Image (cartoon, rainbow, N blue to C red):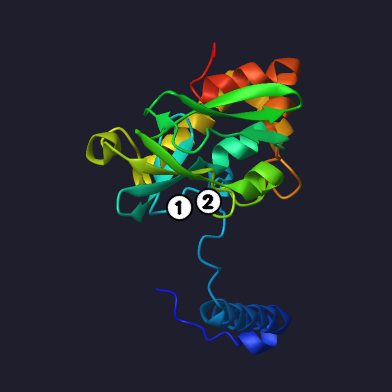
Amino acid sequence: MESFRYVDIFATKGIEYIIVMAFLAAFVCFSRYLSHRPPAPAGRPRTFVDYFRVPDGFLFHQGHSWFKEDGREVVTIGMDDFAQRFLGRIDEVCLPHMGARLRQGEKSWSLIAESRIIPMLSPVDGEVVAVNAAALRSPEVINEDPYGNGWLLKVKATKMEANTRNLLSGNVARTWTMESLNGIRMQNGESLGLVYQDGGAPVSGMAKALYGEEWDEEVRKLFLTQGE
């Protein structure tokens, strides 16, 4: 049997040993840096769909409107983030008058973009008790803050319990948003790349980027108001 021979690695492979030790030291330092680095901000987007906000505390209609309870049967209504990004810049909003009666799933207000009228559906039954005068004066607030200052109506809901059974929230709403995007992907394939900005964020006005002159028909399909 061959006897064991001691090999002096410092004498035979000194340079290689130094390189390996330097690499290990650098790896340890980098690992410690990662372990002590502050975590990424909560809610930081990780995928394309994460750029579309679907916050908790809101109930979503599949026509891309939402409502949030304000108490005493009064709810605030608006359009969701996916819808405003898909449509793009809103030039004018046409809201119902005070006292108007709304029905869930029926046309209740309209948006105007590039002289084209886009109807939207109400997420609830009820009576209009307030309209957002700021959105009437400056429709861009809907694009800037769809879940806050860009609200559209306040409604005294008359069928709250029945209406909420037809709406989506939380993870279910987020999954539905992803499915909406996947439907657009299947329809457009590689051309979906047209709606990415540098850095991966979706452009405002996805419909116009994807569909050209027929964009308004595609918006109506998304909002479930095709033919209105």
Q: Quadrant of residue 10?
A: bottom right
Expressed as whole percent of the image width and height from the top left, the position of residue 129 reads 44, 44
- Residue 170 visible within the image: no
User: Which residue, given by chain and number where applicable, does mark 1 sit on?
Assistant: 55
Q: Residues within 10 Å of mark 2 (few under 14, many from 20)?
A: many
Asked if residue 216 is positioned above or below residue 102 in the image, the reply reads: above
Q: Residue at x 23, y 34 (%)?
A: 162
User: Which residue, given by chain and number where applicable, does mark 2 sit on?
Assistant: 147
Q: Quadrant of residue 25?
A: bottom right
Separation of residues labelled 2 and 1 (CA atoms): 9 Å
Q: Residue at x 65, y 82 (%)?
A: 17
Depth check, mark 2 against mark 1: the one in front is: 2
Q: Residue at x 42, y 35 (%)?
A: 176
Determine whether the residue tagged by mark 1 lies in a helix, strand or loop. loop
Q: Nearer the viewer, residue 84 or 198?
A: 84
Q: Are marks 2 and 1 in contact (CB under 8 Å)?
A: yes
Q: Nearer the viewer, residue 127 or 148?
A: 127
**Residue lying furthest top:** 227
Lower sequence index among marks 2 and 1: 1
- Residue 149 visible within the image: yes
Expressed as whole percent of the image width and height from the top left, the position of residue 179 reads 45, 32
Expressed as whole percent of the image width and height from the top left, the position of residue 51 reads 58, 48
Q: Amino acid at mark 2?
A: Tyr
Q: Amino acid at mark 1?
A: Pro
**Quadrant in which the N terminus is drawn:** bottom left
Q: Which mark is residue 178?
A: none
Q: Residues within 10 Å of mark 1 (few under 14, many from 20)?
A: some
